[in-house]
Image: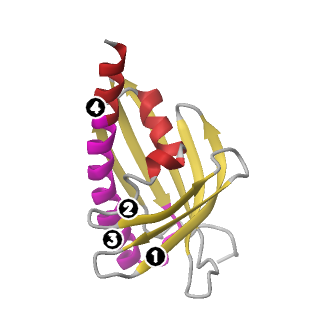
Amino acid sequence: MVPGKTDPAAPELTVSRLIDAPRALVFKAWTQPEHAARWWGPRGFTVESCRLDARPGGTYRVAMRSPEGTLRTKRGVYQEVASPERLTFTYAWEDAAGEPGHTMHVVVTFEARGEQTLLTLRQTGFESVAECDSHREGWTSCFERFAEFAAMMAAGEAADRR
């Protein structure tokens, strides 16, 4: 396979969830570090640091601690930031020396459904089915946390408008 090209037989991941919050708020929660730090990571994980520069060419780096105490850090570069419709970014885990591992690609779309948002994440570039399955489990848990956080944010904004 040519370096940088995606193997068409490689596993892909798609996770979707209907979020009880308007699209602009959902997009904001994905692109502002003070919000992302409260939901990014599987249930039980704690975000220790969260840097997001959500603009084309901007970077992100999120360090999170597992319930067992292991620190996991992911980072990447935003390739597309089309508010409030779409985010495209690279995704790589850091090794113990702080160097990125292999790079995957993520596309997140935000589709307005009245006062709700259909949130869909597609990730490609996995090296194995096991890696894809692990990310499916992580993103599914992350989306559960995100849905709870976004609903809380939406309720707070609704209360502020009263």
Q: Please tell me whether the stretch drawn in magenta is mainly helix, strand or loop.
A: helix
Residue 147 counted in the magenta span: yes
Separation (CA) of disc 1 from disc 2: 10 Å
Separation (CA) of disc 1 from disc 4: 29 Å
Q: Disc number at residue 20?
A: 4
| The magenta segment | 124-152
Q: Residues within 10 Å of mark 1 (few under 14, many from 20)?
A: some
The residue sitting at 31% across, 43% down in the picture is: 149
Residue 21 counted in the magenta span: no
Of callouts 3 and 2, the N-terminal one: 2
Q: Disc number at residue 133?
A: 3
The residue sitting at 56% across, 84% down in the picture is: 95
SS at circle 4: loop
Q: Amino acid at mark 1?
A: Arg
Q: Disc number at residue 14?
A: none
Q: Amino acid at mark 3?
A: Asp
**30 vs 25: above or below:** below
Q: Amino acid at mark 4?
A: Asp
